[in-house]
Image (cartoon, rainbow, N blue to C red):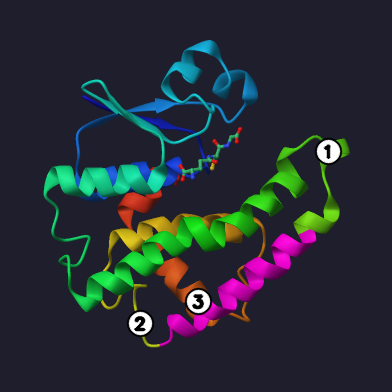
Amino acid sequence: MLKVYHAPNTRSVRIVWLCEELGLDYEKVALEFDPKVLQSENYLKINPLGKVPSMEEDGLVINESGAIVQYLLEKTGDKDLQPAPGTPERGRYLHWFHFAEATLMPPLGNIAQHAFIRPEEKRISAVAEEGKEMAIKILKLLDKELEGRSYIAGEKFSAADIMLGYDLLLAKLFGLLTDAMPNVLAYFNRLAERPAFKKATGQ
Ligand SMILES: N[C@@H](CCC(=O)N[C@@H](CS)C(=O)NCC(=O)O)C(=O)O
């Protein structure tokens, strides 16, 4: 059976959310977000960098959240959560699917590391501050993109919303979602209403 290694409020939310949207039969392996767990000898055999998410099925292990999402969509033959290959809709979908991890996550990751995760003596406040400035700049761009759109790739919910929705969950936890970005707020609330999101975030 498909195993999903998951720790609360981490990128593994994306995978649990997707599995729930697809109605997959899967086993959730709950991990604490703690170096003692993630850097344990056992877990390093699954994920040599000690990060989440990871998935394991029939001897195949994948450790990158976007790759896991894409793999599961392909494996299940899903046509509902992604536009058809080669269409302009697919181009827009791919842009935002990858934007979530490649462009918005780095500043959010810097905030996480330098404001919350690292021991105080290893935090650099300027890195957290710069992360915050960049994240807000990107969220305002996103606000414009969402003007007149229900979902990031268009009128239909897609896996790009799952990728990006996790970023917004973090941005919300960091207090970055404000009235200055009403479209982002409405979009996030729309995503957060989904039963699969609620299951993935333990609400
Ligand atoms: N690009 C990877 C990043 C994975 C990642 O950095 N995960 C974080 C949690 S959101 C983690 O496990 N951090 C623990 C660590 O770096 O020690 C992905 O999308 O799966």
Asked where in the image residue 54 lies, by quadrant, the reply is top left
| Mark 3: secondary structure | helix
Furthest residue to the top?
41
Q: What is the spatial separation of the Cα atoms under label 2 and label 3, in whole angstroms?
A: 11 Å
Marks 2 and 3, the one that precedes in the sequence: 3
Q: What is the spatial separation of the Cα atoms under label 2 and label 1, in whole angstroms?
A: 41 Å
Residue 20 in sight:
no
Picture coordinates of residue 108, whole percent (x, y): 62, 56
- Residue at image coords 32%, 50%: 196
Residue range of the region highlighted in magenta in the rendering: 129-147
Q: Which residue is mark 1?
A: 122
Q: Which residue is mark 2?
A: 149
Q: Residues within 10 Å of mark 3 (few under 14, many from 20)?
A: some
Rendered image: mark on residue 142: 3
**In-front residue for pair 182/18:** 18
**In-front residue for pair 60/187:** 60
Asked where in the image residue 12 lies, by quadrant, the reply is top left
- Look at label 2 and name its amino acid: Arg
Asked if the stretch drawn in magenta spans residue 142, the answer is yes
Left or right for 76, reference 162: left
